[in-house]
Image (spheres, coloured by chain):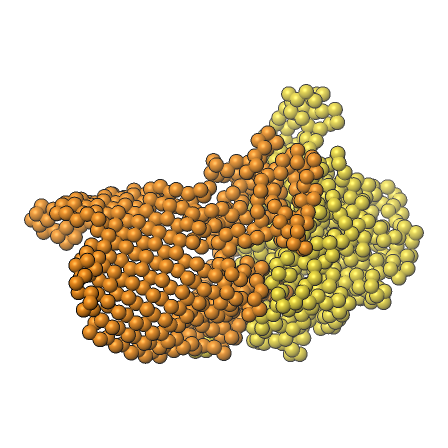
């Protein structure tokens, strides 16, 4: 009567091949989390409703994240992130309890993912149920544990991970977890823990310094790889084919790899929506076709906020060049021309519209002129970091390119934040200036001013550091988590800059209350946990 | 570039083992008695609980064979009373459901494909065992006027315990559900079959077949503590499948929003949104917002009763049969209406589904905005229907004609199926599956179709 399983695996086997596959399963879960297309607006949830981004052509799941009055415990985005985090935790727990002390690097990689998941949970939800061992019998009696206790597990996990993970270049693959990835995650987590217990700020600085002192990473400040296409050195880091360390990107710490499914089985998991979220829907202009240099087809689900677009970057900052924040383009449909009207403000109107002050002919190669309402979803300044175009798939439901999860530029920003928290303002300025050196390198040569963009200790405030994070990491960082962990969400929302009547009423941030800093616990979790009470976060 | 080749294979093991004993006794074909017991084991159950024991007993009384019934034999030619009581076990699940399994998949790294293993969404359960139904059935078989009218009436009452249910777990466990034995349900019902031959003459007969069944299903207990399981939508005293949803009372109009009527009712509503009743709040009184407290049990997903009527007319070699069936009392979420706001911009939909606009101030249909149903109302509708299911006209060629050709029989027939359905359901059909785009088997949604068949049956 005993069941013998022929075509499935069951947990409990500690042989190296099975454990290796389970570790890969953790990476797969990461791909499934951020590549989810079941709710196409999921990625927007972590960007809109903050200072850097506003809603564009919303899909639906992200709407309560900027119309905060609608944010409730039945939101599908909240539910998905919560359940994926506990997927990480369960699978990591199984690996850790199966291998014990016999496979430290496997346990370390599992610890990394467990810490990664718990860090998301405590940042966004506060007190959460803490499970550190594989569950063998069904349970419905979970209770929320204090953040300090969960943080202790995160700290222990990352300490173990840093001690037992391989050095960069020595892991089985370059995107397998190595010491520096664990260090960077620890740096970010310790900065959050420092808000509660400031002894963590020094710990944060220590792990980040360890990454820098290893001298394995340098900021990119020269073009590299295939430079046949026009661009600049900052943009090179985000071209697929040049994103990995092995492809010349000396700044990459964790690059999550993707391939075309037709080339490698398992190359793309689900349908990552990054390009459709971050890039505008310029294909709606009849003079445009989707193409590689414009990064393919976008849906304009979110757009950069006024704060991000106007006044944040100084003149000469390469991160704001047209290759990196694309503000204008040219009609590229071959053999195309049209007669259009131009209104008093310089926007396009129908040639027969009463608002037209003149009528001109535009053709292929001319600078594109948008309609006034286009800035909502059809054309607006956008980050090019998620551009990718597959000639065999013009529609491109999935974006197939690597994900820049962690890079050296952020290491500097985190270390500057750690120094700021320890009142070492000049130390913080010294590090930020390294980013400025990279950002203004060409502008300094062109203007002959070697101090262009340099800052001093008196410039360092938390707002400045958050501004610099936006300048450097827009499109890469989870902005919501950054603002929540620094306790700045409420304040920074005020900087967003999108206001009625310049933006439509249903696209501006409304209804934010202080309790919205934490997300609601999913309703189904509270209802299904019938043998104990999971208290909902206040306000929901 | 090498072409990708995908290979797969699958094997599983299922074993079962049973022992059975039976005693049969009959006296004069009037009194009948049967006793059966069996012990069944199945590998699909948990390590702790593979076997179950199931006894049952049945009595029969052929009343029409009694001496005192002889005078009535021309009127009542058959009357048999049956009683039975017993336990049966239900296996109901596939292999390996009591184990925690892991799924393999693939992930690219270093431009090569790597195998991944992750736990499946179902947790293992070492105690998983047989679902047991204990039931009583009483029935009467009857025949009047030399079986001119015959039929059966059955009444049953069964209690099922240790149901094999997929019980949802909090995602905190890392799993979505677990197979477990839980709860108690009861089913009470009546089933009637009557076959009268209304007219029987040399050339023409008219006979009917009437079937009717009524069933009442109820959850008696779930976890032993008398509490409902809202997360799974299981409520004590109600059927297993219920519709638990908001109550829709209209559509928010612009003047109502402008007057602020929604502020103490559904503050996030906008004009054109579904208007839901604010039934309750944490204190049991309307609380000025729409949330889970405003959901209530609106109906059941299984029919309350089902009936069928077949009329068969035959005249010489012609025969006409008409079959009508009816299903009453069930409710279903109407996904055609529920997805209308997103679908109507992409494909055709039923013309009856309208939409609100500032000019067309509908109180039935919501606006086409993708936030007009922000609380996720499921649009449950009455799924009852009566259907002219089948009409068949057939003609048997007279044997005189065909015997010479060496054929035993030729029958020509024309039949129509699903000819007409009387229902309030909006959409394809109350029985058609309509999975929303992107979920389930939406690529193979298909309506119930009316069909006409012309055919020939030849017997050699």
Colour displayed for chain A in the image of the structure: yellow
Residue at 63 percent across and 68 percent down: it is A531
Quadrant housing residue B136: bottom left
Q: Is residue B111 visible?
A: no
Report the front residue among B251 and A476: B251
Report the front residue among A513 and B223: B223
Position of B452 with respect to A331 (left or right) is left
Q: Residue A179 location in percent, x, y?
A: 73, 67
- In the rendered image, the vertical position of residue B450 relative to residue A434, given as above or below: above
Quadrant housing residue A376: top right
Residue at 9 percent across and 46 percent down: it is B401
Position of B276 with respect to A344 (left or right) is left
Q: Is residue B258 visible?
A: yes
- In the rendered image, the vertical position of residue A258 relative to residue A365, given as above or below: below
Report the front residue among A263 and B321: B321
Q: Residue B152 location in percent, x, y?
A: 29, 60
Residue at 57 percent across and 53 percent down: it is B296
User: Which chain is orange in the rendering?
Assistant: B
Q: Residue B106 location in percent, x, y?
A: 55, 62
- In the rendered image, the vertical position of residue A24 relative to residue B209, given as above or below: below
Report the front residue among A537 and B370: A537
């Amino acid at each position: 009567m005993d069941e013998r399983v022929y075509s499935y695996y069951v947990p409990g086997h500690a042989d190296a091949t099975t454990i290796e596959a389970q570790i890969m399963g953790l990476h797969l879960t990461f791909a499934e989390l951020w590549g989810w297309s079941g709710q196409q607006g999921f990625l927007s949830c972590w960007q809109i409703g903050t200072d850097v981004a506003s809603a564009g052509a919303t899909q639906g799941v992200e709407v309560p994240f900027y119309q905060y009055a609608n944010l409730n415990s039945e939101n599908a985005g909240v539910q998905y992130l919560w359940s994926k985090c506990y997927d990480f935790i369960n699978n990591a727990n199984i690996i850790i309890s199966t291998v014990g002390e016999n496979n430290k690097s496997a346990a370390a990689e599992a610890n990394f993912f467990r810490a990664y998941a718990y860090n998301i949970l405590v940042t966004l939800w506060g007190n959460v149920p803490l499970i550190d061992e594989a569950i063998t019998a069904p349970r419905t009696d979970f209770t929320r544990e204090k953040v300090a206790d969960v943080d202790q597990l995160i700290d222990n996990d990352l300490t173990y991970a840093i001690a037992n993970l391989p050095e960069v270049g020595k892991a089985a693959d370059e995107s397998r977890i190595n010491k520096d990835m664990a260090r960077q995650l620890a740096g970010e987590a310790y900065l959050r823990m420092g808000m509660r217990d400031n002894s963590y700020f020094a710990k944060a600085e220590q792990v980040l310094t360890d990454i820098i002192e290893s001298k394995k990473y340098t900021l990119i400040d020269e073009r590299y790889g295939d430079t046949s296409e026009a661009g600049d050195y900052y943009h090179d880091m985000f071209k697929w084919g040049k994103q990995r360390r092995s492809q010349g990107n000396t700044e990459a710490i964790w690059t999550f790899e993707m391939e075309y499914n037709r080339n490698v089985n398992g190359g793309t998991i689900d349908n990552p929506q990054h390009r459709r979220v971050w890039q505008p829907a310029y294909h709606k202009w009849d003079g445009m076709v989707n193409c590689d240099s414009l990064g393919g087809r976008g849906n304009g689900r979110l757009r950069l906020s006024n704060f991000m677009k106007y006044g944040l970057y100084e003149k000469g900052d390469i991160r704001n060049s047209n290759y990196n924040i694309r503000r204008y383009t040219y009609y590229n449909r071959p053999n195309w021309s049209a007669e259009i009207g131009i209104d008093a403000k310089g926007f396009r109107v129908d040639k027969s519209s009463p608002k037209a002050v003149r009528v001109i002919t535009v053709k292929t190669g001319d600078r594109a002129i948008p309609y006034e309402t286009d800035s909502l979803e059809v054309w607006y300044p956008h980050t090019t970091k998620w551009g990718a175009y597959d000639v065999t798939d013009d529609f491109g439901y999935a974006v197939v390119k690597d994900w820049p999860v962690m890079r050296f530029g952020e290491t500097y920003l985190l270390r500057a934040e750690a120094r700021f928290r320890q009142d070492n303002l000049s130390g913080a300025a010294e590090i930020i200036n390294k980013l400025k050196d990279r950002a203004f390198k060409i502008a300094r040569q062109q203007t002959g001013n070697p101090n262009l963009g340099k800052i001093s200790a008196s410039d360092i405030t938390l707002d400045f550091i958050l501004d610099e994070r936006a300048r450097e990491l827009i499109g890469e960082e989870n902005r919501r988590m950054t603002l929540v962990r620094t306790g700045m969400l409420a304040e920074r929302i005020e900087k967003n800059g999108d206001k009625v009547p310049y933006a439509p009423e249903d696209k501006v941030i409304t209804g934010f209350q202080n309790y919205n800093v934490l997300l609601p616990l999913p309703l189904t979790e509270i209802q299904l946990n019938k043998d104990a009470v999971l208290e909902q976060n206040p306000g929901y | 570039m090498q072409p990708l080749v995908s290979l797969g294979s699958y094997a599983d093991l299922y074993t079962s083992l049973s022992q059975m004993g039976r005693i049969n006794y009959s006296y004069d074909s009037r009194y009948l008695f049967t006793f059966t017991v069996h012990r069944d084991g199945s590998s699909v159950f948990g390590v702790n609980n593979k076997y179950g024991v199931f006894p049952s007993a049945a009595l029969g009384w052929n009343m029409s064979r009694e001496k005192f019934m002889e005078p009535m034999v021309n009127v009542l030619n058959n009357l048999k009373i049956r009683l039975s009581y017993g336990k049966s076990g239900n296996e109901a699940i596939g292999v390996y459901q009591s184990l925690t399994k892991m799924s393999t998949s693939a992930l690219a790294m270093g431009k090569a494909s790597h195998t991944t293993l992750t736990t499946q969404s179902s947790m293992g359960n070492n105690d998983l065992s047989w679902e047991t139904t204990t039931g009583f059935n009483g029935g009467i078989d009857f025949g009047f006027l030399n079986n001119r009218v015959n039929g059966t009436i059955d009444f049953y009452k069964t209690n099922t315990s240790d149901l094999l249910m997929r019980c949802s777990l909090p995602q905190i466990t890392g799993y979505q559900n677990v197979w477990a034995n839980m709860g108690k349900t009861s089913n009470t019902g009546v089933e009637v079959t009557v076959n009268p031959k209304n007219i029987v003459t040399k050339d023409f007969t008219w006979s009917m077949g009437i079937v009717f069944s009524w069933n009442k299903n109820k959850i008696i207990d779930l976890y032993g503590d008398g509490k409902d399981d809202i997360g799974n939508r299981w409520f004590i005293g109600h059927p297993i499948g219920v519709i638990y949803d908001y109550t829709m009372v209209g559509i928010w109009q612009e003047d109502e929003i402008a007057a602020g009527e929604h502020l103490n009712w559904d503050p996030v509503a906008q004009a054109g949104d579904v208007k839901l009743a604010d039934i309750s709040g944490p204190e049991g009184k309307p609380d000025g917002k729409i949330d889970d407290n405003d959901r209530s049990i609106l109906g059941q997903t299984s029919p309350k009763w089902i009936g069928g009527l077949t009329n068969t007319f035959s005249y010489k070699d012609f025969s006409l049969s008409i079959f009508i069936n009816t299903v009453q009392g069930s409710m279903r979420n109407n996904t055609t209406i529920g997805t209308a706001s997103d679908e109507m911009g992409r494909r055709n939909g039923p013309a009856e589904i309208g939409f609100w606009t500032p000019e067309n101030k509908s109180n039935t249909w919501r606006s086409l905005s993708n936030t007009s149903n922000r609380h996720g109302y499921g649009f449950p509708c009455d799924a009852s229907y009566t259907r002219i299911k089948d009409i068949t006209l057939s003609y048997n060629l007279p044997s005189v004609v065909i015997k010479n050709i060496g054929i035993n029989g030729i029958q020509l027939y024309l039949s129509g199926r699903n000819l007409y359905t009387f229902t309030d359901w909006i959409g394809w059909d109350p029985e058609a599956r309509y999975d929303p785009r992107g979920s389930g088997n939406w690529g193979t949604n298909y309506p119930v179709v009316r069909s006409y068949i012309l055919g020939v049956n030849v017997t050699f």
